[in-house]
Image: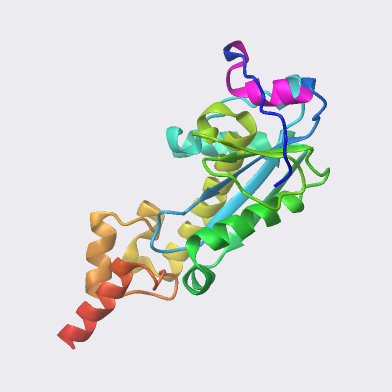
């Protein structure tokens, strides 16, 4: 990881504080990276990276942590982010790769890939929660970054909306699981469908609850 100064954030800048401080200290292209689907037991892991422009254009209306927005508000924020961003990228990790290589390893790899695909190349990278080594620029892990840094919030919105759209498409292929509703997370309804039908190819077979459903299906056969 490239060493970097830690920005001193002023609260009056709000969600854009990290970017403004870094831009004022010679880091014009501040990227945020975040993922969606880490806690799901079905569907892909999706990682996004976003560089927002300085100034008024970078003040995305309605931007917030994707988990705090309604579906309609997320879609509107997504449209604004991709319209305004200097650069953005998405990396999709299929469930088979999560099973074979491991969730955390694939999450880290996808973060690096998403950031490396940005053009212009970021001069500083903010990640949500935990540090990522091997980035092409100085990097800082920000606790609850999707709630305190605009570029990370933008990445969370892009990742979440991209993944939700993919899960809606998977619902059409595998309607028994109602992926469009729970997006592959382990809700009671999803677990009931898993117990009844067993897993489909889009489930993560390395997860205990998915493996358990296979045993249950075998026991009833």
The residue sitting at the front extreme is 3
Q: Looking at this view, is 213 or 165 the one in front?
A: 213
Question: How many marks are shown on the rendered structure?
Answer: 0
Image: 97 above or below 45: below
| Front residue (pair 1, 16) | 1
5 or 77: nearer the viewer: 5
Q: Residue at x 20, y 78 (%)?
A: 216
Above or below residue 221? Residue 126 is above
From this view, report whether residue 117 is shown above or below residue 130.
below
**Relative depth, front residue between 43 and 177:** 43
Identify the image quadrant of the C terminus.
bottom left
Q: Is residue 15 part of the magenta span, yes or no?
A: yes
Is residue 117 rendered to the left or right of residue 207?
A: right
The span picked out in magenta is 12-23
Q: Is residue 125 magenta?
A: no
**Residue 202 position by quadrant:** bottom left
Q: Picture coordinates of residue 39 (x, y %)?
A: 40, 54
Which residue: 67% across, 23% down?
59
Q: Which residue sits at x=25%, y=57%?
A: 189
Residue under the image location 79 percent in, 37 percent down = 123
- Residue extending farthest to the left is 220
Percent position (x, y) of residue 188? 23, 56
Name the residue at the bottom extreme: 221
């Amino acid at each position: 990881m490239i060493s970097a100064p830690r920005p001193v954030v002023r609260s009056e800048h709000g969600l854009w504080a990290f970017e403004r401080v870094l831009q004022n200290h010679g880091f014009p292209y501040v990227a945020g990276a975040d993922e969606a689907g880490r806690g799901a037991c079905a569907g892909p892991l999706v990682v996004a990276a976003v560089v927002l422009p300085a100034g008024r254009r970078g003040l995305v209306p309605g931007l917030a942590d994707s988990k705090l927005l309604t579906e309609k508000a997320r879609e509107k924020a997504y449209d604004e982010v991709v319209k305004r961003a200097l650069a953005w990228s998405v990396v999709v990790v299929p469930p088979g790769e999560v099973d074979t290589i491991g969730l955390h390893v694939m999450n880290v790899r996808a973060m690096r890939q998403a950031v490396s695909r940005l053009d212009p190349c970021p001069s500083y990278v903010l990640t949500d929660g935990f540090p990522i080594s091997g980035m092409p620029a100085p990097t800082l892990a920000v606790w609850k970054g999707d709630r305190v840094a605009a570029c990370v919030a933008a990445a969370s919105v892009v990742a979440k909306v991209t993944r939700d759209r993919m899960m809606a498409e998977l619902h059409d292929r595998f309607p028994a699981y109602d992926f469009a509703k729970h997006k592959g997370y382990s809700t009671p309804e999803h677990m009931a469908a898993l117990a009844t039908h067993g897993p489909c190819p889009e489930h993560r077979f390395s997860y205990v609850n998915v493996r358990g459903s296979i045993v249950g299906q075998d026991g009833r056969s």
